[in-house]
Structures are given as C-alpha cells and as structure tokens.
Image: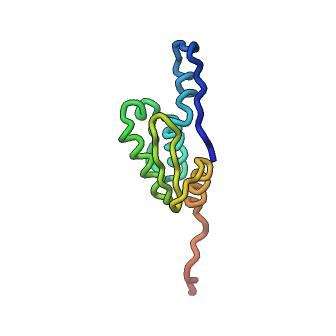
Amino acid sequence: MKTCTMNIEKNAIQELNYDDMNEIAGGFSSEVVNDSIYLKKLGLLHDTVSDIQTLFHWVEATKFVEGGWAKVGITCVTIYQSCNFYYYQGKMVSRDDALEIAKKACIKGPKIGPRVYN
C-alpha cells in the first residue's frame, strides 16, 4: 500500500515556481487532476479538472472525480492535504489497484447473446 510522506526542512523556505508546486502537490491536488485524466480516458468522465479548479473549487472538482470512481464501484475519498484513499468492495486498496480495477471494469469485450439465424 502506498504511503505519502513529505520531507520539508525548516530552513529551506524559498519562493516556488509553478513546476515546484506540481511536485509538492503530487499525491494531493495533482492526484485528483491525474485521476480525472485517467477516468476521462476510460470514458468514465466527460472532462478533466485542472490544478486551478482543484485550488479554487476543491469541493466541486473532487465531487466530479469521486463520481467517476463511483461508476466502477470505487469509493475515492479525496483529502486536500494528504493522499487520496480508495476503497473497493469495502476494503482499502492502493491507488494503483484502483486504477487497474477501473481499467478492467471498462474493458469492452465482444457481446455474447443469442445467435441470429436466417
């Protein structure tokens, strides 16, 4: 299971640029953004959310992404200052496992049904 850790030195305060913010946000808001991209590719969402949307419209953005996860039976609990938590069939799973479950749920194979005879 994945764990999130942040190592911040007390005296290492400096001005951060946009790329630095993405690295820090990894596992937090960027996890929501990346989930939205993945879920859109699978056809579970009609759009993606951006870093700006998660920053200024956290509740709406996360509700949107959590809805995409729910379509494949995964409960995603988004947390602003921590890693997201994923649950499948009542058990906590890693993000990687959740991504794989969603992928498998969206694989469309041949439809099997009654044969049509002429």
Percent x, y of residue 40: 50, 47
- Number of callouts in the render? 0
Q: Nearer the viewer, residue 17 or 2?
A: 2
Residue depicted at 59% across the width and 57% down the height: 101
Q: Quadrant of residue 19?
A: top right
Say left or right for 6 vs 54. Answer: right
Percent x, y of residue 32: 49, 40
Percent x, y of residue 10: 56, 17
Q: Nearer the viewer, residue 30 or 42?
A: 30
Q: Quadrant of the C terminus?
A: bottom right
> Is residue 39 depicted above or below 118 in this figure?
above
How is the structure coloured here? Answer: rainbow
Residue depicted at 60% across the width and 49% down the height: 94
Residue most toward the front?
10
> Is residue 37 depicted above or below 55 in this figure?
below
> Is residue 17 depicted above or below 105 in this figure?
above
Residue depicted at 41% across the width and 30% down the height: 55
Residue depicted at 55% across the width and 59% down the height: 106
Say left or right for 21 vs 52. Answer: right
Q: Nearer the viewer, residue 96 or 5?
A: 5
